[in-house]
Image: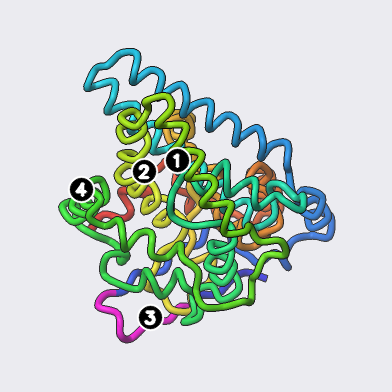
Amino acid sequence: MTTQSTATFAPDLPLTTKPLRPAVLAEASALSADARREIMALSGARPKRFAAELVFTWACIAAFITAGVYFDNLTVTLFCIFLIGTRQMALALLLHEQVHRLGMRSKYADWFINVFAVYPLFVTTVEDYAKVHLSHHKYCFTQDDPDFLRKSGDEWTFPKSLGQLVMIAVKDLTAMNLIRLIRGKTAPRTDEFTRRNPSPKWLRFAFFAVAAGALTAVGGWTVFLIYWVVPAMTVTQLMVRWIAVCEHQYNIDNGTIHETTPLIQLTWWQRALMPDLNFGLHAYHHMHPGVSFANLPKVHEIYRREGLVDESAIFHGQGAYLKYLLAR
């Protein structure tokens, strides 16, 4: 069963975005029985891969901080700040993975991820973000979708001129958009997606107390401000926006996943410079939210083998998608 456009445009929006030409041509129900069994086998948590990604991300952060301090050069410092910001975004993507219970599955898994991936980013918790993000999945592109409501405005409407895109990027990099960008990461007033064993409030206070004590003991506050707070307030905010833009086209009311979600295949250097944990394959994540980021490329190959992918509608590299977002 191929997809048909059902998108309607919200009448109260200042501008509307045209639906994408779908790259994924059908719902999961169109897959053969063998293909569905293959995807079922790919589903479930992948704790080893998740842990490896978490360790690798922190190793990269440590290496970039060390390089910045060692060379003590403005150019190197700025480059390291940029790279650290991209790895802070990787931590946020691991939060997303944990929200779907695709990372660690123990009783205290959310506690662990809060300490080693979420609290360091200052903004939210696994528990709060689960309420936001799982609401987005259940009520996608309706008035009950918090992402849709937060991004239903001119700032998230495309195409835009190069000047408009540059202005948004400058505001992100100078923390002028900080409050608006993080507002959507806080929890809506719902108990629908409450976690089974939420982290106690004292854990967050304890984390920051221990971190502050450690920084004071080693005299590390200057390094912390330059190599953690600065990228978190600037580069990471730009990365948050870019990932969000790559996830969905907004201002399309009741649009299908296929016409709101691009398929973007990153080049090798883009994956190395700005790891996105396969978010370019976000359409498959919505269709199969029980599949780990590590297995989304395999899901893509299954759909391709089934003849359910329009190769000409795939964006090859982030530059191709950025070009699409520009006013023509």
Kindly tell me whether residue 222 is visible in this rendering.
yes
How far apart marks 3 and 4 lie (CA) works out to 29 Å
Q: Circle 2 — which element?
A: helix
Q: Amino acid at mark 2?
A: Ala
Quarter of the N terminus within the rendering: bottom right
> In the drawing, what numbered circle is on residue 232?
2
Residue linked to disc 1: 88
Q: CA distance from mark 2 to mark 4?
A: 15 Å
**Amino acid of disc 1:** Gln
Residue 9 numbered mark, or none: 3
At 52% from the left edge and 67% from the top edge, which residue is drawn?
Answer: 132
**Mark sitting earlier along the chain (1/4):** 1
Whichever of labels 3 and 1 marks the residue nearer the N terminus, that label is 3
Asked if disc 1 and disc 2 are in contact, CB closer than 8 Å, the reply is: yes
Q: Is residue 43 visible?
A: no
Do callouts 1 and 4 mark residues in contact (Cβ within 8 Å)? no
Can you give x and y, in whole percent of width and height, for residue 203 in the image? Answer: 58, 51
Q: Nearer the viewer, mark 2 or mark 4?
A: 2
Question: Residue at coordinates 71% horizontally, 61% vertically from top-left?
Answer: 197
Along the polypeptide, which appears first: circle 2 or circle 4?
4
Give the percent coordinates (x, y) of residue 237: 34, 49
Q: Position of residue 82 (x, y in %)?
A: 33, 33
In the picture, measured across the screen, residue 196 lies left or right of residue 124, that is right
- Helix, strand or loop under label 1: helix
Which residue is rendered at x = 34% and y = 13% of the image? Answer: 70
Mark 3 vs 4, N-terminal side: 3
Q: Secondary structure at mark 4?
A: helix
The residue carrying pointer 4 sits among few (fewer than 14), some (14 to 19) or many (20 or more) residues within 10 Å by Cα, namely some
Where, by quadrant of the figure, is residue 88 drawn?
A: top left
